[in-house]
Image: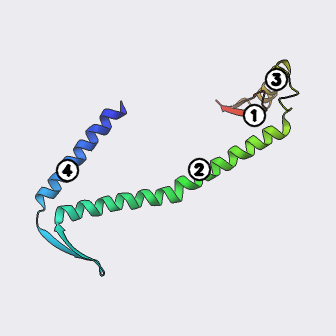
Amino acid sequence: MIRPIRTILAVVFLAVGAALGALNPAPITVDLGLFRFEAALGVILLGVLLLGVLLGGLVLTVSVVLPMRHRHRRERTSVTQDATSTAIPSSTQTSSQATTDIVAIRSADRSADRSVERSVEPGGIEHGLHQ
C-alpha cells in the first residue's frame, strides 16, 4: 500500500520541480564570498530546497534519533545483564527446570503487575512483553 503512494508522491514532486525550473529560467549569479556561480533561478531554488531538507534531516538525526538509539541500547544491555546475573546457567538447568522457572516468573509477574508479561528462555534471557 505504501509503495504506490511513494511512487505517486515522487512523480508529483518531480513534476513540481520541473515546472519550477521551467517557469524560472532567468539566469542569476550567486556570490558566496569565496565562490561565485551562475545558474537558472529554478535550479538555484531547487538546490536550496534540497539543501534545507538534507540539513534538517541531519539535525533531526543528531538531536533525536542518535540519543534515542543510545538510550535504547543502554536499556537493552542493562536488562540483558540483569537477566543473566539472576538466572541459573543453562548448562545446569534442565528443560523441566526452565519450564518451571517460566511458569513461576509468569505467575509472579501477573500477580505483581498485569500490564507486563515476562518469560525467561533456557539461556537466561528475559523478555518483557507489554500488553
Residue denoted by label 4 = 16
Q: Which mark, by number, is residue 125?
A: 1
Image position of 93 with respect to 30: above or below: above
Mark 1 or 2, nearer chain start: 2
Mark 4 or 3, nearer chain start: 4
**The quarter of the displayed image where residue 26 is located:** bottom left
Q: Amino acid at mark 1?
A: Ile
Q: Amino acid at mark 2?
A: Arg
- Residue visible at 78% across and 25% down? 106
Q: Are marks 4 and 2 in contact (CB under 8 Å)?
A: no
Q: Viewer-nearest of labels 4 and 1?
A: 1
Q: CA distance from mark 3 to mark 1?
A: 11 Å
State which quarter of the image contains the N terminus. top left
Q: Amino acid at mark 4?
A: Val
Q: Are marks 3 and 1 in contact (CB under 8 Å)?
A: no
- Residue visible at 29% across and 64% down? 48
- Residue 13 lies, in percent from the top left, at 24, 48
Element at label 1: loop
Q: CA distance from mark 4 to mark 2?
A: 36 Å
Element at label 2: helix
Residue denoted by label 2 = 69
Residue denoted by label 3 = 98
Mark 4 or 2, nearer chain start: 4
Image position of 127 with respect to 54: above or below: above
Q: Are marks 4 and 1 in contact (CB under 8 Å)?
A: no
Which of the two residues, 32 or 67, is positioned nearer the viewer here? 32
Horizontal side of 99 relative to 20 (left or right) equals: right
State which quarter of the image contains the C terminus. top right
